[in-house]
Image (tube, helix red, strand yellow):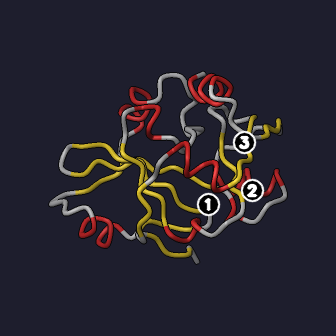
């Protein structure tokens, strides 16, 4: 698995936790007993034919009009499951870690996560989560921090 190999190779500071299978970021938040705002979910979009990783809290949704404007795209859509499987061949579908850099993708992180002391995210499987301090995540993932999402109702 690319993520764990990457984190171990550079001696990153992180913790892993095994849990019952979860298939959404909100389910993982519940399993890990953390608020949805602390769970970082990656959403892959295709803007003008280019894939981007958008990282946002589990309890938020992307404002596609805002994102489209911020990245100066004419068209934007969610990546399909087939495209996701190709992009993240080392991960279970839906358990992608929020490290676009490992997959050649620019990563956008929403400002709503920026001041968190830590985040929790899928480690590439539906049964392993990773907890990492925000400073460490930003140092390793090198996301572009912009405001592109809103709380889900």
Q: Quadrant of the C terminus?
A: bottom right
Work out whether 114 lies above or below 2.
below
Say if mark 1 contacts mark 2, CB within 8 Å: yes
At x 70%, y 53%, the residue is 133
At x 54%, y 45%, the residue is 98
At x 28%, y 68%, the residue is 70
Q: Quadrant of the N terminus?
A: top right
Q: Residues within 10 Å of mark 3 (few under 14, many from 20)?
A: some
Q: CA distance from mark 3 to mark 2?
A: 12 Å
In percent of width and height, residue 50 lies at 24, 43
Work out whether 77 lies above or below 1.
below
Work out whether 98 lies above or below 133.
above
Q: Residues within 10 Å of mark 2 (few under 14, many from 20)?
A: many
Which residue carries the number 2 mark? 29
Mark 3 or mark 2, which has the lower sequence index? Answer: 2
Disc 3, SS:
strand
Q: CA distance from mark 1 to mark 2?
A: 8 Å
Work out whether 66 lies above or below 95.
below
Q: Is residue 94 left or right of residue 30?
A: left
Which of the two residues, 105 or 9, is positioned nearer the viewer here? 9
Which residue carries the number 3 mark? 130
């Amino acid at each position: 698995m690319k993520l764990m190999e990457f984190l171990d190779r550079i001696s990153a500071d992180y913790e892993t936790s095994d849990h019952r299978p979860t298939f959404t970021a909100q389910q993982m938040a519940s399993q890990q007993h953390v608020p949805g705002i602390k769970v970082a979910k990656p959403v892959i979009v295709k803007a003008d034919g280019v894939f981007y990783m958008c990282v946002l809290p589990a309890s938020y949704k992307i404002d596609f009009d805002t994102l489209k404007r911020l990245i100066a795209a004419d068209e934007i859509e969610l990546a399909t499951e087939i495209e996701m499987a190709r992009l993240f061949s080392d991960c279970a579908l839906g358990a992608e870690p929020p490290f676009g850099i490992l997959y050649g993708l620019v990563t956008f992180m929403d400002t709503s996560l920026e001041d968190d002391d830590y985040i929790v995210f899928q480690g590439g499987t539906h049964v392993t989560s990773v907890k990492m301090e925000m400073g460490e995540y930003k140092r390793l993932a090198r996301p572009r921090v912009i405001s592109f999402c809103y709380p889900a109702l």
